Amino acid sequence: MKMKKSANCIAIVAIFAFASFGCNKTSFYTNRLGDAEWSAQELSVDGVNQVELPSWDLSDCDPYDESCTGDWEIHGGKSSFVWQFREAANRFEISNQSVTTGDHSTDEAVIQCQQFSGVYDVVKREKDAMEFTSTKTLGFTGKKVVIKITRGGHSH
């Protein structure tokens, strides 16, 4: 009976440790990505890079207390979006939060952010470079989308 209780206790501790590790990874990579400017080096659909590459200005946030927000910027136009790491930082999600306004620069940023909103697989998550891939974006369902970003100012 004591052996069974011991085994159950070890299993419970292992489950909590694993869950905690997943939360810690999500928080760690959220902190690494947040509170910084990132420039897109690639924003491609089925291997064709977009002509206009955005920069992201991301807020500092606690993913367990608030929504992480950012600005998707192109040539002075800006779209707001919500972002998050999920599944122990193996998934990344972008969700556009802006609407078109009739201003050309703003609308260009809003439309691009809408099209690239979706759930991505995290391919690379280094301190100064990240890469995400998806076939589940709003504007390009079923096509391979790649986003490669590097830490730093605007890419244009």
Image: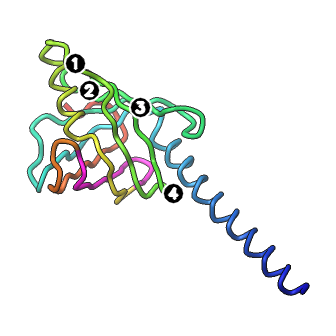
Task: Give the total of numbered labels.
Answer: 4
Give me the residue at 16% from left, 56% from top. 142
The answer to which quarter of the image holds residue 115 is top left
**Marks 1 and 2, how far apart in space?**
6 Å
Residue 132 part of the magenta-drawn span: yes
Identified by mark 2, the residue type is Glu
| SS at circle 1 | loop
Residue that appears at 47% across and 37% down: 34
Q: Are marks 1 and 2 in contact (CB under 8 Å)?
A: yes
139 left or right, relative to 91 = left
Q: Position of residue 54 (x, y in %)?
A: 23, 33
Label 4 belongs to which residue?
A: 88
Badge 1 amino acid:
Gly
Kindly identify the amino acid type of the residue bearing the numbered disc 3.
Answer: Leu
> For numbered disc 4, what is the local secondary structure?
loop
**Residue 103 marker:** none
Q: Which residue is mark 2?
A: 73
Q: Is residue 24 above or below residue 63?
A: below
Coordinates of residue 147 in the picture (x, y in percent): 25, 48
The answer to whether 58 appears left or right of 135 in the picture is: right
Which dot marks residue 76? 1
Q: Residue at x 43, y 33 (%)?
A: 36
Q: Closer to the N terminus: mark 2 or mark 3?
A: 3
Quadrant where the image shows the C terminus:
top left
Tell me which label, 1 or 4, sits earlier in the chain.
1
- Residues drawn in magenta: 125-137
